[in-house]
Image (tube, coloured by chain):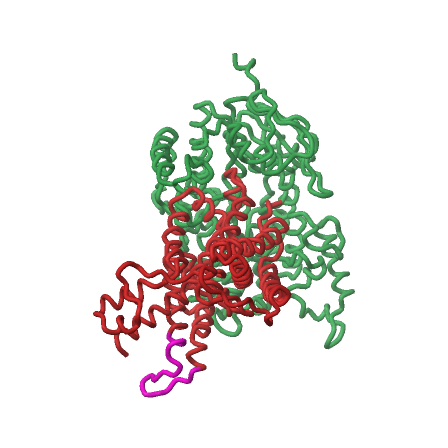
Amino acid sequence: MDFLTIIQVLDGTIRLAIPLLLACLAGLFSERAGIFDIGLEGKMLMAAFFSAAVAYSSGNAWIGLLAGIAASMALSAIHGIASITFRGNQLISGVAINFLAAGLTVLIAQDWFSQGGRTPQLSGAARFNAIELPGALTRIRDIRDAGPFMQLYSELISGHSILVYLGFLTVPLTWWILFRTRFGLRLRAVGESPEAVDTAGVSVVGLRFAAVAICGILCGIAGAYLATAIQAGFTKDMTANRGYIALAALIFAKWRPWYALYACLLFGLFFAIDNRFQNIEFFGIGLPVQFMQSLPYILTVVILAGFVGRAIPPRAGGEPYVKER
Amino acid sequence: MPDTQPPAIELRGISKAFGPVQANKDINLSVKRGAIHGIIGENGAGKSTLMSILYGFYKADKGEILISGQITHIPDSQAAIAAGIGMVFQHFKLVQNFTVLENVVLGAEDGALLGPSLSKARKELTALAAEYGLDVDPDALIQDIGVGMQQRVEILKALYRQADILILDEPTGVLTPAEADQLFRILGRLKEEGKTIVLITHKLREIMEITDTVSVMRRGEMTATVETATTSPEALAELMVGRKVLLRVEKKPAKVGALVLEVRDLKVTDDKGVQKLRGISFDIRAGEILGLAGVAGNGQSELLEVLGGYQKAKGTIRMNGEEIDLTGRHSDAQSRRARGIAHVPEDRHREGLILEFQAWENMAFGYHNDPKYQKNALMMDNDAIRADTAEKMARFDVRPPNPLLAAKSFSGGNQQKIVLAREIERNPDLLLIGQPTRGVDIGAIEFIHQQIMRLRDEGKAILLVSVELEEIMSLSDRIAVMFDGQIMGERLPEKTDEKELGLLMAGMAGEAA
């Protein structure tokens, strides 16, 4: 395995980690505020469809992105009303959102485009195209002949869509909001002890809706990235359970932004390895392709089974806030 | 001219219902500025509800609130804070994994960024600490500090928000006597500074000790407001219950018999690896009550769990001379009952009863294999259980005496009587009883204490675990004090006082005393 191959795998890691990361941070905002959100998957899927559909008809990826965010936030609002206003069961609301998104996207896609539940291929400005940083080589042959630093720069650092760079920026931004602002303090407090927030004279409902709205925005970007940056259009169930893997990554990351980045990169790496190598030799034993494909999911199960040390979720997570009687 | 000043708080005709339950009925109350005003009443009398209304936590159905003579509308806590009201709830409203500083600042930040707020609060806390003797480490996490400290944080929160009126709901429930005295000193200082303090409690001693005036509540109504100096504990108790109450149980000299329970070097380590019991040894003989005093969380619960058969332990326990299995197949509650150990657990809602189940079902728990309860090899004789329950309810004066009522529908005192009836009526050799009167009204306390005494006079051995020092002092024949998983010392009730026990409870070995 030469250096360029490693870089190419890492490049794939980044591409595949970004949607996970955005969804994971979306979940982080929601769960830190005490609202469990199993509906990340559905929100991403809805956003993927609407961003692709609107990007196709407008010819502008940015308008598509806004449409994706709006679609995702609409689902967030449903989740918020069900679990905050009506104090419903957060898991059931999330599952319902996933079902709704899975069915509705295909149904509308078929109705609008009649292409078997997908959107037409996007091209040109309807997609978020790769940004070549200054001085980066673009042709494969040039990269192959370049030195390792140039290879690293051109292949790994340069050549991603704007959403990738934005995605990475959300990590320090999330950290800063959570730990350096008044909003962050209150957000963390409401997920730990809503009664402390309430008696301090701050609205529990307002904070939780704000968190759920941010969750919607980030899921919207994640979905748009899938449909208008990685892929060129929406296909049925294109989120491929990334929403659930993001939740696993969130637990792995113990609800912390920087750990979330590392966790998502790890998952991204598994997906990238699987994409790159169909068969892999491991100490002389050929591992079948199915094993490689299932690796991220095996990791998910291992994480969820609690093999990575005790992860303490926000104390009030999943519990609707009711003033005690 | 203090008399021309409007009262700090005036409540007029406050009413509040939760569904069919009328928690507050047409309450009028006036609290003088700069006074410490006590509100006393039994559990469920409506004290906490009334104060929660004042703090904007609940909305009153009717009535108005005047703060310093001004009609003030308090729809939420924000409004209460703005009106200069601070509240220290019985269950602290703190974020466990935040620092003291973060908890103080939460909701009272100065701007969108945290940094300036935190450094301002840090300075302010130092000033408040100096002024009122409220020292706390601003950077400590709440989960790492004791309840006494946590309570200080709650008071600091209120003062940081510039509260003039401070409401404290049952503030001494979790404190050692020494910590309670310290709290009272702080309250005294606050009073000197002109703050108005409302103290909600069910402890008569505290009312007598610290308040200037006292209001008594019973069943949602304000029954009286009197100057503390002109009343007595007996008179207040009568106002609370509505009839004469015996505050002290009659105690005949103990007729101590054979050794019943022998505990040697008992050790328990919890699943986090923390040692909860560090080598406990004691004896209990027939016909005596060993009172185990201590602040909650110093290993008393674990000790009861071990003796009751649902916590494994190292060490030796002998019951009537025979060794008890502490780790193996016979270390369960069933085997303990078979040995003549009855257990009235500390937390009757979690361990004593299933609240959703009816009284007769609860009466059978743990004794469901009783041959009397079986119809045949397969079926239980529910009629027999109900009849038995009705009989026991009558003997223990459970109200209402209806075996078909769900356990949750009974008041705290009557729930406790159900558990007590179930355990005592089995004629055990040893009764384990934890917090027998927690959340129990004064009238029922009297009855429960009499039952415990009756059992002792019948020659049973009794282990009484309670955080209420008064209860321990009045019932026990011997008193052992627990601190940090150890027994700090044993005293005779007639040869000790609350002060000495308080020192032991705080972990200070009192050999010199």
Magenta range is A273-289
Image colour for chain A is: red
The spot of residue B89 in percent (x, y) is: 52, 40
Q: Is residue A15 visible?
A: yes
Quarter of the image where the C terminus of chain B is located: top left
Q: Is residue B473 left or right of residue B131?
A: right
The reply to whether the magenta stretch includes residue A244 is no
As drawn, the residue found furthest toward the top would be B1
Please report the residue visible at 65 percent of the width from the left and 46 percent of the height from the top.
Answer: B447
The spot of residue B36 in percent (x, y) is: 52, 27
Q: Is residue B107 left or right of residue B426?
A: left
In which image quadrant can residue B32 be found? top right
The spot of residue A33 in percent (x, y) is: 50, 51
The spot of residue B187 in percent (x, y) is: 46, 30
Q: Is residue B100 left or right of residue A238?
A: left
Is B206 placed above or below B429 here? above
Residue B204 vs residue B94, the one in the foreground: B94
The reply to whether the magenta stretch includes residue A283 is yes
Please report the residue visible at 73 percent of the width from the left and 43 percent of the height from the top.
Answer: B20
Is A267 placed above or below A201 here? below
Image colour for chain B is: green
